[in-house]
Image (tube, rainbow, N blue to C red):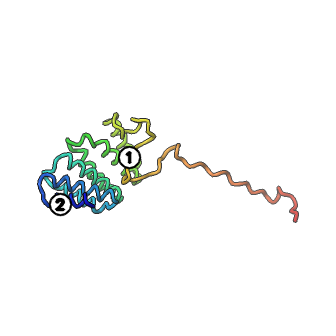
Amino acid sequence: ARAAAAYRLAIKQGGPEAARAQVELAEVARGADRHEEAAALYRVVTESRGAAPEVTNRALLGLARSEAALLRFARARDALFRLVGRAEAKAVAPDALLLVAETYLAEGRDADGEAALRHLLATFAEAPQAPGSSPRAGPTRTRSSPSRRPRGPASTPPRPPPAPRARSWRSTGPRRR
């Protein structure tokens, strides 16, 4: 609560740290699962001019995470594509591409999700977010990223046992009571 008050004060005072304080306040809101509020705060930074590039990058990534948490996947991807298109965003581009893939998969658009993962692997093969780049079983999911059950042979549910065959009345012989 004290941190949020300090961020609000810094925003009110303006100046070069106002955008950074806005992002920090949005992070507090997102951390408390207040994604509508967080998205609105991030949007102010992403639509303003003059914020430091790393602050704008954090705002775009945070905006995408909040939009994804609100199941607004197309809006999340819009923010992510803006982020990936920025020259200063190379450090966060692997996270952005992973989230792009997750939003596609969450919508059931598996081919698009797989294409995004292939692009991530081809472009950032050494990044920890790239599939198969580390001993982990798969991509890391953040608290606010969309969740989805894994697909493929390892996650295919076992088949139910075959139903017992009904015996024909002819094969059972006379009924005994």
Name the outermost residue toward the left. 15
Name the outermost residue toward the front. 2
Q: Is residue 33 above or below residue 157?
A: below
Q: Marks 2 and 1: CB-CB under 8 Å? A: no
Secondary element at tag 2: helix
Task: Of the two numbered discs 2 and 1 on the same chain, state the one appearing first in sequence.
Answer: 2
Residue at left 66%, top 51%? Answer: 161
Which is nearer the eye, 108 or 31? 31
Q: Give how far across and how far down residue 46 sits, in percent.
A: 20, 54
Q: Give how far across and how far down residue 149 sits, in percent.
A: 47, 50
Q: Quadrant of the C terminus?
A: bottom right
Residue at left 38%, top 46%? Answer: 113
Which is nearer the eye, 20 or 124? 20
Q: Type of residue at label 1?
A: Gly
Residue at left 32%, top 36%? Answer: 124
Q: Give how far across and how far down residue 33 sits, in percent.
A: 34, 60
Residue under pointer 1: 113
Residue under pointer 2: 9
* Side of 122 where 177 appears, left or right: right
Residue 89, numbered label: none
Q: Is residue 69 above or below residue 111?
A: below
* Side of 154 where 72 appears, left or right: left
* Side of 168 where 54 appears, left or right: left
Q: Give how far across and how far down residue 131 sits, in percent.
A: 40, 39
Q: Type of residue at label 2?
A: Leu
